[in-house]
Image: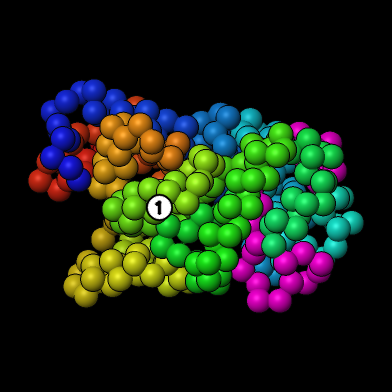
C-alpha cells in the first residue's frame, strides 16, 4: 500500500469497481453437477473457466462447457497438454467445442502430471499443431506463476514466456496470462514488473483466492505448491481460533487496483477469482464489491463488503 491511497476518495473506490468489473471465475465439472442453474449464482455472460483435472474424463469438461453456454455464460474450457492422449483426441475435442459450444477461447496449460499420457509435453507443442487456428480459437490463456512453479524451473518458465510472446506476435492468436492464486500483492506487482523487464507483452489476469476459511485456503495452497502464500497462511493458522475465520482478498485488491490505476505500464488487466470456498460465496462477495456495496477500511488497508 502506497501513501497515495485516499480512502475517502470516491474515484479510488470507483477504480476498485472497474478493476473487478470483468472478473472471471471457474468451476470443476464435479461442482457444476451440484448446481441446478448457474443463473442463480452468476450474472449472465460471466466468463467461466471449466477445469480439466488430472485423471478426470474430458467429456465432463466438454459437457459442462456446453451447459454453461446454454445457460447464458461464456465457457472457457481448460486443455491440459500432458493429459491429452493423442493429437486426434485434441482435434476431436476442439471440433466439438467449436461446433457444439461455439468456443473461441480456452485456457491451455501444461498440466500437473509427471509423465505425459500422450505425445504432448507442453502447451507450446499444442500451439504448434496449428489446430487451434484451424478451429478458430483466437484467445488463448496461458499459465502464470507469480510465486514460481512447483513443477518447472524458473529458467524454463522464463524461456516459455518468451516463446509465447513470440508466438503471439507471429500469429493472429490473442495470448494472455492467467495466474495461480496468490495472497501477497507486493509479490504480484514485483513479478509483473519483472516479466515486463524480460520483455513480456502479454496482458495478465491475476488469480486471487475466493471467500473461504484460512484452513481451506491453506489446504489448497499446500496442494498447489504456492510457497509464499503457504507461509502467509501458516502464520495466520498459528492461532487455532483463526483457522475457521473467513478470509477475503480485499487487501490484495486495494493494492492491485492502486497499482493498476496509477502505473501506466501495469500489465494487469483484471481478476480471476478461484472459488475455493464455493462459487456462490465468492461470487456474492465480488458482485457486491462491483456494485459498490463496500466501505473502505483504512485501519486494515482493505475494504468491508456489505452483502
- 30 vs 119, left or right, is left
Q: Nearer the viewer, residue 36 or 223?
A: 223
**Helix, strand or loop for disc 1:** helix
Q: Residue at x 72, y 38 (%)?
A: 171
Residue 98 lies, with reference to residue 277, above or below; the image says above
Q: Residue at x 24, y 28 (%)?
A: 12
Q: Nearer the viewer, residue 148 or 248?
A: 148
Q: Nearer the viewer, residue 285 or 299?
A: 299
Residue 280 makes an appearance in the image: no
Range shown magenta: 94-121
Whether residue 113 is in magenta: the answer is: yes
Q: Main secondary structure of the magenta part?
A: loop
Whether residue 171 is in magenta: the answer is: no
Q: Nearer the viewer, residue 169 or 274?
A: 169
Please identify the residue farthest to the top as the structure is shown: 11
Across and down, in percent, residue 46 comes to: 54, 34
Across and down, in percent, residue 211 comes to: 36, 52
Please identify the residue farthest to the left as the structure is shown: 299
Find disc 1 in the rendering and name its residue: 194
Q: Residue at x 70, y 56 (%)?
A: 124
Amino acid at each position: 500500500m502506497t501513501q497515495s491511497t485516499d480512502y475517502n476518495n470516491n474515484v479510488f473506490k470507483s477504480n476498485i469497481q472497474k478493476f473487478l468489473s470483468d472478473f472471471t471465475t471457474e468451476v470443476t465439472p464435479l461442482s457444476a453437477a451440484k448446481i441446478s442453474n448457474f443463473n442463480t449464482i452468476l450474472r449472465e455472460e460471466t466468463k467461466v473457466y471449466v477445469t480439466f483435472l488430472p485423471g478426470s474424463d474430458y467429456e465432463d469438461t466438454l459437457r459442462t462447457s456446453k451447459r454453461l453456454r446454454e445457460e447464458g455464460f461464456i465457457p472457457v474450457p481448460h486443455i491440459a497438454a500432458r493429459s491429452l492422449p493423442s493429437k486426434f483426441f485434441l482435434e476431436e475435442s476442439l471440433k466439438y467445442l467449436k461446433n457444439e459450444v461455439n468456443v473461441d477461447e480456452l485456457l491451455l496449460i501444461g498440466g500437473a502430471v509427471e509423465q505425459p499420457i500422450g505425445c504432448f509435453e507442453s502447451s507450446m507443442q499444442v500451439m504448434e499443431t496449428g489446430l487451434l487456428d484451424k478451429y478458430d480459437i483466437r484467445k488463448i490463456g496461458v499459465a502464470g506463476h507469480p510465486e514460481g512453479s512447483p513443477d518447472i524451473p524458473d529458467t524454463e518458465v522464463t524461456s516459455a514466456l518468451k516463446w509465447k510472446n513470440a508466438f503471439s506476435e507471429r500469429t493472429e492468436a490473442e495470448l494472455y496470462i492467467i495466474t495461480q492464486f496468490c495472497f501477497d500483492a507486493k509479490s504480484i506487482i514485483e513479478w509483473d514488473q519483472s516479466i515486463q523487464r524480460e520483455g513480456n507483452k502479454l496482458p495478465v489476469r491475476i488469480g486471487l483466492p475466493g471467500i473461504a476459511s484460512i484452513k481451506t485456503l491453506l489446504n489448497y495452497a499446500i496442494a498447489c505448491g504456492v510457497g509464499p502464500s503457504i507461509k502467509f497462511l501458516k502464520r495466520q493458522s498459528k492461532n487455532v481460533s483463526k483457522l475457521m475465520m473467513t478470509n477475503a482478498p480485499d487487501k490484495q485488491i486495494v493494492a492491485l487496483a492502486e497499482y493498476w490505476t496509477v502505473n501506466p505500464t501495469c500489465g494487469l488487466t483484471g481478476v480471476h477469482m478461484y472459488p475455493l470456498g464455493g462459487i456462490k460465496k465468492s461470487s456474492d462477495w465480488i458482485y457486491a464489491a462491483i456494485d459498490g456495496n463496500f466501505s473502505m477500511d483504512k485501519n486494515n488497508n482493505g475494504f468491508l463488503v456489505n452483502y
